[in-house]
Image: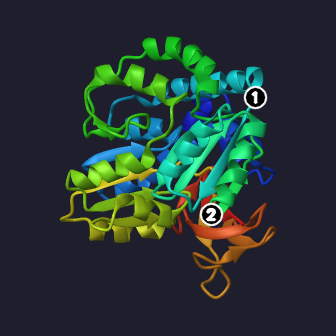
Amino acid sequence: MIVETIGDMAGEDIASRLCDTDTNDSELHDAQLDAFAFGLVVLQACRDAGLQPDFYAGQGAAAYAALVAANVLGLEESVRLVLARRDAIRVASQSRPGATARIDGLDEDELEAVCALTDRRVWVSAYRGPASVWVGGEREDVAHVCQIALDRGARSAHVLSTTAAYNTPLMAPARDLLLPALSTVRFSEARRPVVANCDGRPHQKREAWTDLLAAEVCNPLRWRQGIHRLATLGVDTFLDLGSTDGKEFASAAGTSSRALTIEAPGDVESAAAAVTSARHALSIGEGLDVAERLVVSHVTGVFMPLPAQLVTTEGEIVRKGDTIARVAGEPLTSPFTGWLMGLLALPGERVRQGQPIAWLRSI
């Protein structure tokens, strides 16, 4: 399994972390490797279904999964870079603490003006959608801008509990720490163009990626601009893997395009059928607002789902302690509560201890 392989490369138990119920958004940068690994799990399912996108894109650490998908990076190199990026951001956030907030319902031009006119250390850090923007900077300044945004009619302004000002000049030390690791990597020509976060443009030449990945750490994520640019290039269908907000993604794509959100294994087959003749792009969301979790097998043996009248169907809630299947004749119970997105093993399949069996999304 890809999760186990990445865990072995990193020397970390990613599978256990994906099953951990004790999570919080104060450690977003520490979850980068997990988000990268989970993105590749879903990406492999798309490949198995025969999906061959014309473009790739990825948010945050998921950008490295997009680079693997496009053959720009090998798996071992990408794991090393994601670890270096995670460590660099952790060091930068400790030396220059800050905050990040999401503001919805206010035009991005007006929010840019608010950040500039306050004469404070706060900047736009991510353009997520036409009226969904993230800001980052010094904690008090971020809170001040959120209040101004609400006074000007913003629908909501939520300060995350994280201590990092992601994608802002406060992350400049992280860029400097990441550059040496990037400079040792030999990038390859992209099989399909990959959209860079820092400029919102598709790139295929290998020479560009050292500077692009370094710049992305301390410059705003131009997600909306990138998706919109792909639409102008003729992309009419977007496959959205784990976006934090499907409606936000669709609005960024524009009215002339459609966005198909892949939230469960069963969505992959229907998406593959829908894009057989379409020019499409595949995006991998970082999922910072959604806790994705895997239920793994506790033993090695034959997997058998429960009878149809007993098993919870996709999209329904699995409670902590619920039995969702049997492996080697023993009940497999969920260690947490969440929405069942799908089963990852086939009836009669021999699975290994630690192999992911079910995909849940925490409530």
State the CA–CA distance, disc 2 to disc 1. 29 Å
Q: Which residue is drawn at 25% across and 40% down?
A: 192
Q: Nearer the viewer, residue 4 or 186?
A: 186
Q: x, y (%) of residue 88?
A: 63, 22
Q: Residue at x 28, y 70 (%)?
A: 273
Q: x, y (%) of residue 95?
A: 75, 20
Q: x, y (%) of residue 214?
A: 48, 22
**The label number, if any, that marks residue 76 in the structure image:** none
For label 1, the crowd category at 10 Å Cα-Cα, with few meaning under 14, some 14 to 19 and many 20 or more, is some
Residue 202 location, quadrant: top left
Disc 1 secondary structure class: loop
Q: Residue at x 74, y 45 (%)?
A: 144
Mark 2 highlights which residue? Answer: 153
Amino acid at the residue labelled 2: Gly
Q: In this view, does 318 lie to the left or right of 9?
A: right
Q: Which residue is drawn at 62% across and 17% down?
A: 173
Amino acid at the residue labelled 1: Pro
Mark 1 highlights which residue? Answer: 97
Residue 342 location, quadrant: bottom right
Marks 2 and 1 in Cβ contact (< 8 Å): no
Disc 2 secondary structure class: loop
> Is residue 234 depicted above or below 127 in this figure?
below
Q: Which of marks 2 and 1 is nearer the N terminus?
A: 1
> Is residue 200 depicted above or below 75 in this figure?
below
Residue 99 location, quadrant: top right
